[in-house]
Protein backbone atom coordinates (compact mmCIF):
# COMPACT_ATOMS: atom_id res chain seq x y z
CA UNK A 1 0.00 0.00 0.00
CA UNK A 2 1.30 3.47 -0.90
CA UNK A 3 2.29 5.79 1.95
CA UNK A 4 2.28 8.93 -0.20
CA UNK A 5 -0.98 10.23 1.27
CA UNK A 6 0.01 9.70 4.90
CA UNK A 7 3.37 11.37 4.34
CA UNK A 8 1.78 14.34 2.56
CA UNK A 9 -0.84 14.65 5.31
CA UNK A 10 1.80 14.59 8.03
CA UNK A 11 3.73 17.35 6.27
CA UNK A 12 0.59 19.46 5.82
CA UNK A 13 -0.42 19.08 9.49
CA UNK A 14 2.88 20.54 10.68
CA UNK A 15 1.41 23.97 9.97
CA UNK A 16 -1.16 24.01 12.79
CA UNK A 17 -2.75 27.30 11.74
CA UNK A 18 -3.16 26.19 8.12
CA UNK A 19 -4.55 22.82 9.20
CA UNK A 20 -7.13 24.46 11.49
CA UNK A 21 -8.24 26.80 8.68
CA UNK A 22 -8.50 23.88 6.26
CA UNK A 23 -10.57 21.85 8.73
CA UNK A 24 -12.96 24.76 9.28
CA UNK A 25 -13.31 25.33 5.53
CA UNK A 26 -14.19 21.70 4.83
CA UNK A 27 -16.84 21.71 7.55
CA UNK A 28 -18.36 24.87 6.05
CA UNK A 29 -18.53 23.06 2.70
CA UNK A 30 -20.28 20.09 4.29
CA UNK A 31 -22.71 22.37 6.13
CA UNK A 32 -23.62 24.13 2.87
CA UNK A 33 -24.25 20.81 1.16
CA UNK A 34 -26.51 19.67 4.01
CA UNK A 35 -28.40 22.97 3.98
CA UNK A 36 -29.01 22.83 0.22
CA UNK A 37 -30.22 19.24 0.33
CA UNK A 38 -32.68 20.01 3.14
CA UNK A 39 -34.22 22.76 1.02
CA UNK A 40 -35.41 20.09 -1.45
CA UNK A 41 -38.46 18.29 -0.01
CA UNK A 42 -38.02 15.24 -2.25
CA UNK A 43 -34.22 15.01 -1.69
CA UNK A 44 -34.19 11.44 -0.32
CA UNK A 45 -36.53 10.29 -3.08
CA UNK A 46 -34.21 11.81 -5.70
CA UNK A 47 -31.23 10.06 -4.11
CA UNK A 48 -33.05 6.72 -4.21
CA UNK A 49 -33.95 7.25 -7.88
CA UNK A 50 -30.37 8.18 -8.78
CA UNK A 51 -29.07 5.17 -6.86
CA UNK A 52 -31.45 2.83 -8.69
CA UNK A 53 -30.28 4.17 -12.06
CA UNK A 54 -26.62 3.67 -11.17
CA UNK A 55 -27.25 0.18 -9.78
CA UNK A 56 -29.00 -0.81 -13.00
CA UNK A 57 -26.24 0.68 -15.15
CA UNK A 58 -23.42 -0.97 -13.23
CA UNK A 59 -25.14 -4.36 -13.41
CA UNK A 60 -25.67 -4.08 -17.18
CA UNK A 61 -22.28 -2.76 -18.26
CA UNK A 62 -21.78 -5.55 -20.80
CA UNK A 63 -24.88 -4.41 -22.71
CA UNK A 64 -24.78 -0.63 -22.17
CA UNK A 65 -21.11 -0.11 -23.04
CA UNK A 66 -21.47 -1.92 -26.37
CA UNK A 67 -24.66 0.03 -27.09
CA UNK A 68 -22.87 3.29 -26.33
CA UNK A 69 -19.92 2.39 -28.56
CA UNK A 70 -22.17 1.52 -31.51
CA UNK A 71 -24.19 4.72 -31.21
CA UNK A 72 -21.14 6.92 -30.63
CA UNK A 73 -19.50 5.50 -33.77
CA UNK A 74 -22.73 6.09 -35.68
CA UNK A 75 -22.49 9.74 -34.55
CA UNK A 76 -19.02 9.98 -36.09
CA UNK A 77 -16.95 9.56 -32.94
CA UNK A 78 -13.91 7.31 -32.60
CA UNK A 79 -14.14 5.02 -29.56
CA UNK A 80 -11.13 3.56 -27.76
CA UNK A 81 -10.89 1.17 -24.80
CA UNK A 82 -8.03 1.17 -22.31
CA UNK A 83 -7.36 -1.63 -19.85
CA UNK A 84 -5.06 0.41 -17.59
CA UNK A 85 -3.36 3.79 -17.10
CA UNK A 86 -0.48 3.05 -19.47
CA UNK A 87 -2.77 2.12 -22.33
CA UNK A 88 -4.97 5.15 -21.63
CA UNK A 89 -2.04 7.57 -21.73
CA UNK A 90 -0.67 6.03 -24.91
CA UNK A 91 -4.05 6.18 -26.66
CA UNK A 92 -4.37 9.89 -25.87
CA UNK A 93 -0.79 10.57 -26.95
CA UNK A 94 -1.19 8.67 -30.23
CA UNK A 95 -4.32 10.67 -31.10
CA UNK A 96 -2.55 13.96 -30.37
CA UNK A 97 0.59 12.90 -32.19
CA UNK A 98 -1.35 11.84 -35.30
CA UNK A 99 -2.83 15.34 -35.44
CA UNK A 100 0.46 17.12 -34.77
CA UNK A 101 -0.80 18.61 -31.50
CA UNK A 102 1.73 20.50 -29.39
CA UNK A 103 -0.68 22.65 -27.33
CA UNK A 104 -3.33 20.72 -25.40
CA UNK A 105 -5.92 22.15 -22.99
CA UNK A 106 -8.01 20.18 -20.49
CA UNK A 107 -11.00 20.65 -18.28
CA UNK A 108 -11.13 18.78 -14.98
CA UNK A 109 -10.71 15.01 -15.28
CA UNK A 110 -10.08 12.74 -12.31
CA UNK A 111 -9.34 9.89 -14.73
CA UNK A 112 -6.50 11.90 -16.25
CA UNK A 113 -5.26 12.80 -12.78
CA UNK A 114 -5.29 9.21 -11.57
CA UNK A 115 -3.54 7.98 -14.74
CA UNK A 116 -0.93 10.80 -14.53
CA UNK A 117 -1.67 11.89 -18.08
CA UNK A 118 -0.14 15.37 -17.78
CA UNK A 119 3.45 14.34 -16.98
CA UNK A 120 3.24 11.58 -19.58
CA UNK A 121 2.32 14.04 -22.33
CA UNK A 122 4.76 16.70 -21.14
CA UNK A 123 7.57 14.17 -21.34
CA UNK A 124 6.54 13.66 -24.97
CA UNK A 125 6.93 17.38 -25.70
CA UNK A 126 3.26 18.40 -25.51
CA UNK A 127 2.24 21.48 -23.53
CA UNK A 128 -0.68 20.60 -21.24
CA UNK A 129 -2.80 23.36 -19.69
CA UNK A 130 -5.44 22.82 -17.02
CA UNK A 131 -8.41 25.15 -17.58
CA UNK A 132 -10.34 24.48 -14.37
CA UNK A 133 -9.35 27.36 -12.07
CA UNK A 134 -8.46 25.21 -9.08
CA UNK A 135 -6.51 22.74 -11.21
CA UNK A 136 -4.72 25.58 -13.00
CA UNK A 137 -3.62 27.09 -9.69
CA UNK A 138 -2.19 23.76 -8.58
CA UNK A 139 -0.54 23.18 -11.95
CA UNK A 140 1.29 26.50 -11.69
CA UNK A 141 2.26 25.66 -8.09
CA UNK A 142 3.40 22.16 -9.11
CA UNK A 143 1.09 20.61 -6.51
CA UNK A 144 -1.41 17.75 -6.52
CA UNK A 145 -5.13 18.27 -5.82
CA UNK A 146 -6.23 17.67 -2.25
CA UNK A 147 -9.93 17.10 -2.91
CA UNK A 148 -11.83 15.30 -5.66
CA UNK A 149 -14.25 18.21 -6.23
CA UNK A 150 -12.43 21.21 -4.70
CA UNK A 151 -8.85 20.51 -5.75
CA UNK A 152 -7.30 23.71 -4.38
CA UNK A 153 -9.35 24.05 -1.21
CA UNK A 154 -6.15 23.88 0.86
CA UNK A 155 -4.71 26.96 -0.88
CA UNK A 156 -5.43 30.42 0.55
CA UNK A 157 -6.27 33.36 -1.69
CA UNK A 158 -3.14 35.18 -0.51
CA UNK A 159 -1.08 32.34 -1.96
CA UNK A 160 -3.02 32.56 -5.21
CA UNK A 161 -2.41 36.31 -5.37
CA UNK A 162 1.33 35.84 -4.97
CA UNK A 163 1.28 33.07 -7.60
CA UNK A 164 -0.61 35.15 -10.16
CA UNK A 165 1.65 38.13 -9.51
CA UNK A 166 4.58 35.95 -10.53
CA UNK A 167 2.90 34.05 -13.40
CA UNK A 168 0.45 36.62 -14.82
CA UNK A 169 1.76 39.98 -13.69
CA UNK A 170 -1.22 40.84 -11.48
CA UNK A 171 -1.14 43.71 -8.98
CA UNK A 172 1.15 43.16 -6.02
CA UNK A 173 -0.83 42.47 -2.85
CA UNK A 174 -4.21 42.16 -4.60
CA UNK A 175 -5.83 38.99 -3.27
CA UNK A 176 -9.40 39.82 -4.27
CA UNK A 177 -10.98 36.58 -5.62
CA UNK A 178 -12.94 38.36 -8.37
CA UNK A 179 -9.85 40.21 -9.58
CA UNK A 180 -7.78 37.02 -9.56
CA UNK A 181 -10.51 35.09 -11.39
CA UNK A 182 -10.63 37.70 -14.16
CA UNK A 183 -6.84 37.53 -14.47
CA UNK A 184 -6.96 33.74 -14.80
CA UNK A 185 -9.76 34.01 -17.38
CA UNK A 186 -7.74 36.45 -19.48
CA UNK A 187 -4.67 34.21 -19.36
CA UNK A 188 -6.60 31.04 -20.13
CA UNK A 189 -8.48 32.64 -23.02
CA UNK A 190 -5.18 32.86 -24.93
CA UNK A 191 -4.44 29.23 -24.12
CA UNK A 192 -7.80 28.20 -25.53
CA UNK A 193 -7.29 30.23 -28.70
CA UNK A 194 -3.91 28.63 -29.42
CA UNK A 195 -4.78 25.07 -28.34
CA UNK A 196 -4.90 22.52 -31.14
CA UNK A 197 -6.88 20.00 -29.08
CA UNK A 198 -8.93 19.88 -25.91
CA UNK A 199 -10.11 17.23 -23.46
CA UNK A 200 -13.11 16.94 -21.19
CA UNK A 201 -14.21 14.20 -18.87
CA UNK A 202 -17.85 13.17 -18.74
CA UNK A 203 -20.38 13.13 -15.95
CA UNK A 204 -22.62 10.75 -17.86
CA UNK A 205 -22.43 8.69 -21.06
CA UNK A 206 -25.82 7.93 -22.64
CA UNK A 207 -25.93 4.42 -24.08
CA UNK A 208 -29.04 4.81 -26.23
CA UNK A 209 -27.70 7.86 -28.11
CA UNK A 210 -23.90 7.63 -27.88
CA UNK A 211 -23.80 11.10 -26.31
CA UNK A 212 -21.87 12.36 -23.30
CA UNK A 213 -23.02 14.89 -20.71
CA UNK A 214 -20.56 17.35 -19.16
CA UNK A 215 -21.64 19.51 -16.21
CA UNK A 216 -19.50 22.49 -15.15
CA UNK A 217 -19.73 25.84 -13.38
CA UNK A 218 -16.87 27.72 -15.02
CA UNK A 219 -17.63 27.30 -18.72
CA UNK A 220 -14.14 26.02 -19.51
CA UNK A 221 -15.46 22.74 -20.91
CA UNK A 222 -17.67 24.75 -23.29
CA UNK A 223 -14.59 26.55 -24.59
CA UNK A 224 -12.75 23.27 -25.02
CA UNK A 225 -15.55 21.70 -27.01
CA UNK A 226 -16.03 24.80 -29.18
CA UNK A 227 -12.63 26.27 -30.01
CA UNK A 228 -10.14 23.49 -30.95
CA UNK A 229 -10.90 21.28 -33.95
CA UNK A 230 -9.93 18.10 -32.06
CA UNK A 231 -11.83 17.21 -28.91
CA UNK A 232 -11.26 14.17 -26.69
CA UNK A 233 -13.66 12.97 -24.00
CA UNK A 234 -12.19 10.45 -21.57
CA UNK A 235 -14.12 8.77 -18.77
CA UNK A 236 -14.52 5.56 -16.80
CA UNK A 237 -17.12 2.97 -17.70
CA UNK A 238 -19.07 3.71 -14.50
CA UNK A 239 -20.34 6.92 -16.13
CA UNK A 240 -22.72 5.00 -18.37
CA UNK A 241 -26.50 5.46 -18.08
CA UNK A 242 -29.15 3.72 -20.21
CA UNK A 243 -30.87 6.68 -21.88
CA UNK A 244 -31.79 10.35 -21.72
CA UNK A 245 -34.91 9.56 -19.76
CA UNK A 246 -32.79 8.16 -16.91
CA UNK A 247 -31.21 11.62 -16.63
CA UNK A 248 -34.58 13.33 -16.79
CA UNK A 249 -34.13 14.44 -20.40
CA UNK A 250 -36.58 14.29 -23.26
CA UNK A 251 -35.69 14.10 -26.97
CA UNK A 252 -37.55 17.38 -27.54
CA UNK A 253 -36.51 19.56 -24.60
CA UNK A 254 -33.32 19.04 -22.62
CA UNK A 255 -33.13 19.27 -19.69
CA UNK A 256 -36.62 19.16 -18.26
CA UNK A 257 -37.68 20.01 -14.70
CA UNK A 258 -34.97 19.28 -12.13
CA UNK A 259 -37.43 17.50 -9.87
CA UNK A 260 -37.78 14.95 -12.67
CA UNK A 261 -34.00 14.69 -13.07
CA UNK A 262 -32.52 12.78 -10.12
CA UNK A 263 -28.98 12.52 -11.47
CA UNK A 264 -28.84 16.11 -12.73
CA UNK A 265 -30.29 17.33 -9.44
CA UNK A 266 -28.25 15.37 -6.90
CA UNK A 267 -24.93 15.86 -8.71
CA UNK A 268 -24.53 19.67 -8.32
CA UNK A 269 -25.97 19.78 -4.81
CA UNK A 270 -23.61 17.09 -3.55
CA UNK A 271 -20.54 17.86 -5.63
CA UNK A 272 -20.56 21.56 -6.55
CA UNK A 273 -22.73 22.90 -3.69
CA UNK A 274 -25.16 24.61 -6.09
CA UNK A 275 -28.77 23.91 -7.02
CA UNK A 276 -28.00 23.45 -10.70
CA UNK A 277 -24.82 23.47 -12.74
CA UNK A 278 -24.20 26.68 -14.71
CA UNK A 279 -23.35 24.75 -17.87
CA UNK A 280 -24.72 21.37 -18.99
CA UNK A 281 -23.29 20.15 -22.29
CA UNK A 282 -24.78 17.36 -24.37
CA UNK A 283 -22.18 16.21 -26.91
Image (cartoon, grey):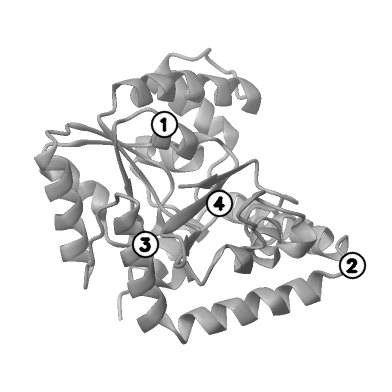
Separation of disc 3 and disc 2 at Cα? Answer: 37 Å
**Quick check: marks 1 and 3 in contact, CB under 8 Å?**
no
Image quadrant where one finds the N terminus: bottom left
Specify whether 101 is left or right of 254: left
| Whole-percent x, y for residue 218 in the image | 56, 37
Q: Nearer the viewer, mark 1 or mark 4?
A: 1
Name which of mark 1 and mark 3 comes first in the sequence.
3
Q: Nearer the viewer, residue 90 or 184?
A: 90
Vertical order, 154 against 11 (above or below): above
**Marks 1 and 3, how far apart in space?**
22 Å
Gap between marks 1 and 4, in whole Å?
A: 25 Å
- Label 2, secondary structure: give it: loop
The first of marks 1 and 2 along the sequence is: 2
Q: Which residue is mark 2?
A: 41
- 38 w.r.t. 218: above or below: below
Tell me the crowding category of disc 2: few under 14, some 14 to 19, or many 20 or more residues within 10 angstroms, Cα based: few
**Relative image position of residue 282 (x, y in whole percent):** 51, 48
Residue on which the image places disc 1: 226
Between circles 1 and 3, the one closer to the viewer is 3
User: Which quadrant holds residue 175?
Assistant: top right
Q: From the viewer's side, name the closer residue of 275 and 241.
A: 241
The residue indicated by pointer 3 is 71
Give the residue displayed 41% in from the left and 18% down from the top.
Answer: 168
Furthest toward the bottom, the residue is 59
Q: Residue at x 35, y 83 (%)?
A: 62
Percent of width and height locating residue 139: 36, 40
Q: Is tag 4's residue or tag 2's residue first in the polypeptide sequence? A: 2
Which residue is disc 4 drawn over?
Answer: 150
Does residue 117 appear left or right of residue 48 in this picture? Answer: left
Q: Is residue 171 left or right of residue 90?
A: right
Q: CA distance from mark 4 to mark 2?
A: 27 Å
Amino acid sequence: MSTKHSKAAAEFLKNKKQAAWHDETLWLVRAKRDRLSKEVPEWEELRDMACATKLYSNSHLDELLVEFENNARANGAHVYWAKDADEYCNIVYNILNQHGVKHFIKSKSMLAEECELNPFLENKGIEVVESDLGERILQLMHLKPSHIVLPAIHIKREQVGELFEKEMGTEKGNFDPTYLTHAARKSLRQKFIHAEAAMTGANFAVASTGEIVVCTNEGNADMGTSQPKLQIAAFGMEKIVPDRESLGCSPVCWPVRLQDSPLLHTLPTTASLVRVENFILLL
